[in-house]
Amino acid sequence: MPAKQQPATGGDPSPREGSRAGRRWDGLRERVRHGLRTRAWRLRLYGLLSVQAGLAAALAWFVVFQFLGNPTPVLAPTTAVGIVAASMGSRLRRTIELLVGVVLGLAVGDTLMPFFGIGAWQTGVVVVLAIIIAVLLKGGGSLLTQAGGTAVLIATLEPPVRDLSVPRFVDAAVGGLIGLAVGLLLVPVHPQRTVKRLAEPVLDPAVTALHDLAAALRQRDLGAAQRGLGALRTLSPRLTALDEGLDAAQEVVRLAPLRWRERPSLAFYTEAVRHMERSLHSCRSIARRLTKALRDDEPISEEYPAAIDLLATSVQTLRCAIRAREEPREARQQILAAVELVGKAQGAAAPDPTRPHTHRLGYSGMIAAGEFRTAAQDLLIASGLDADRAAELVRRTADPDEWG
């Protein structure tokens, strides 16, 4: 018998080991590229905020030091930076909350510190009382944060001296007004560019996830469908940021004179983005229901994946038309064609209303069909149609026999 051959210690790795190492390397490179893209996007989005914050802090310190005679201005630049940092939401509302928080922190700190002195437990008590009062006033997160933060400053950085509340509040008010002026008058953000940068990381992954879902439905691959659903669910924080960005953009064109001329175009753009965002919520419900349909081994007709692919394509077509400021006729045709495909996937109801209806879909598939029509209606509204016209087109396309 031939002797057993011993494996060579210095030979090439097996094909399986090589492919595994290649996949790990490819995965590492993809994670690195994704991380770089994410950081570049955040720098483009928030880079101007750093300039605004630095300018606001410098101006607040200079004004309070030169004109109000405060040799150690602390609250003014702190409040100014807080106002600028609140620019991705309702800046006026947060400005009021920040100033009220400063008043609460000052009042509590100046009332208690002269009696109890400076120390660890005194700081804790002052912060607790300031936040409790802010909660009783039904304040939001900005008010609670500023009240507690100001109380800490009073309890640790400032000596326990009476009769300083008014000068400190003046410093905070000046800082708040300077922060507001920098963000709205001197260096306002570009509203459409900001909304566009916030919408890109929402729409692109959503379109990809919908295409992946369609492929999973064709292959009845439950794992791939669950991954597509997970990709849509991970967009929730970005959708929240998009909502805040839309509010901030509308506030900028309303209050910043340099952006007043952009009011008409931004109004259409933000309305379109809001309805596209709503359609994505419906798409997430579609993905959840169709994933359950696969899990329950329900029938899914071949028109359903084609409809989802077409709906995802319509999102890209609509976005390109909105950017080019063109009439989105092609996008509307794609949306209605997708609705028609879902109607075919659902199947016609029995002609006799006394008999049970016969459908080509199961329970979850039927619910997903309703969510699909909701998503299509929101996309039609995003294309510039009014709500009644969009609803009528969806109903006519979904059930042409009823409308003749």
Image: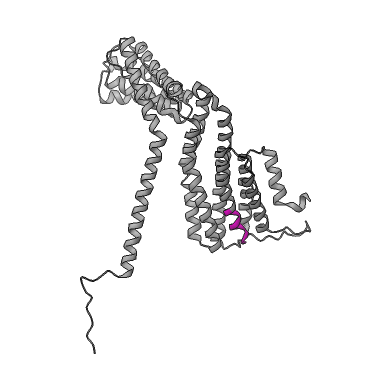
Residue 130, quarter of picture: top left
Specify start and end residues of the magenta stretch as a single range.
301-309
The residue most toward the left is: 9
The quadrant of the image that shows the N terminus is bottom left
How many circles with numbers are drawn on the protein? Answer: 0
- Asked whether 81 or 52 is in front, the reply is 52
Q: Would residue 134 be seen by someone viewing this image from the given angle?
A: yes
The reply, left or right, for residue 158 in relation to residue 224 is left
Image spot of residue 280 (x, y percent): 55, 45
- Predominant secondary structure in magenta? helix
Magenta stretch contains residue 308: yes
Q: Is residue 300 left or right of residue 235?
A: right
Find residue 45 and report its horizontal and vertical position in percent.
42, 35
| 307 in magenta | yes
In the foreground, 160 or 207:
207
Residue found 55% across the figure and 60% down from its top: 217
The picture places residue 127, in percent across and down from the top left corner, at 34, 25
Q: Residue 150, relative to residue 12: is it above or below?
A: above
Q: Which residue is depicted at the point 33% across and 13% down? A: 64
